[in-house]
Amino acid sequence: MKSKKLAVWGRRVPGYLIRFIWAGLCAVAMLTQTRLVYRLPYAPDVLDGFILTSTFFAYNVVLRGRWIRRAAWFSGVIALVLVYFLQPQRQWTIGTLGILWCLYYGVGNPTRTGLRTSPIAKPMLVAFAWAGATVLLPLPWVMWSGSITLFMGRAAFIFALAIAYDLHDRDFDRNRGLLTLANQLPDLKVFRLVNTALAFTAVCVLIRWLQGDIALQVAGALWVSLLLSAGIIFGLFRCKTPLNWRKMIIDGLMLLQTTLVWLAI
């Protein structure tokens, strides 16, 4: 019996570990993309470590598995320590993002409190938090005014992924009494919403190119990534994709986009 349990554990742990770290890796990828398009010197530093560990914490601390929660809290402690070594500008920005995270979950039962219970506020809060972490954090304040289009495009892209997340969790959220846009709208309208957000991102890319902010090949890479994202999201819900991996594929669209941008630069 014991060997059987060990065998099951051995099969499941790799998948759990990959899912545990996946969102953090995607966040670091988007952070890297911002540095690439602004041609900032890149070498993994304290900020990368903070983004990685804080994302581990934020995405896993409310899950049911005891060891996952413990690992998430451990990651949160590391993230808190790393904040001390960041510049004051970044510390203030992180504090604001932390407030957004608290507003998202609220106090107590996450299905009854917090802006996570609002169908519209939920994906918007996720979108702006991710855009703040991956666009504003790596840039000095003097560059923020020139990054508004990138910020809005990044937020729209993450908004599209958040809606796809909610579509994946539709039955689970309904059973827990959590209202989302995905469980209030028919599939066709959900996909239209996703595609509208991706189209908005494409317009932001066009504006950045016309302003000379990015080269044509980078804009092309971003447009290709958005087209692929629309097709992949639609395909994920039209074929028999294993449910355990669907969210990871959705998050993986961030890695896909960053890879295409890196190849284009």
Image (cartoon, helix red, strand yellow):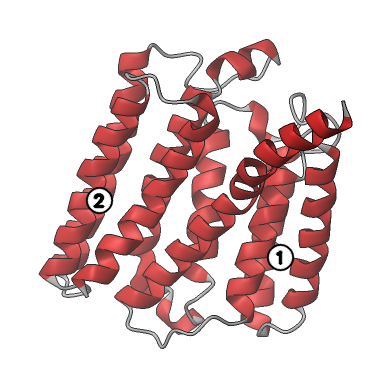
- Front of the two marks 1 and 2: 2
- Whole-percent x and y of residue 210? 12, 67
Q: Is residue 99 visible?
A: no
Q: Secondary structure at mark 1?
A: helix
Location of residue 115 with respect to 75 vertically, above or below: above
Tell me the amino acid under the disc marked 2. Answer: Ser
Residue 177 in picture, x, y percent from top left: 69, 14
Q: Amino acid at mark 1?
A: Gly
Q: Residues within 10 Å of mark 2 (few under 14, many from 20)?
A: many
| Picture residue at 45% right of the left edge, 32% below the top | 163
The answer to whether the residues at label 1 and label 2 have Cβ atoms under 8 Å apart is no
| 78 left or right, relative to 234 | right
Measured along the vertical axis of the image, is residue 173 above or below residue 49? above
The N terminus, quarter of image: top right
Closer to the camera, 46 or 239?
239
Residue at 32% over, 83% down = 39
Q: Secondary structure at mark 2?
A: helix
**What is the spatial separation of the Cα atoms under label 1 and label 2, in whole angstroms?**
31 Å
Location of residue 140 in the rendering, given as x and y in whole percent from the top left corner: 49, 82
Q: How many residues crowd mark 1 within 10 Å: few (<14), some (14–19), many (20+)?
A: few
State the residue position of label 2.
225
Residue under label 1, please give it.
Answer: 95
Quadrant, the C terminus = bottom left
- Which residue lies most toward the bottom here? 41
Using residue 81 as the reference point, say whether residue 212 is left or right of it: left
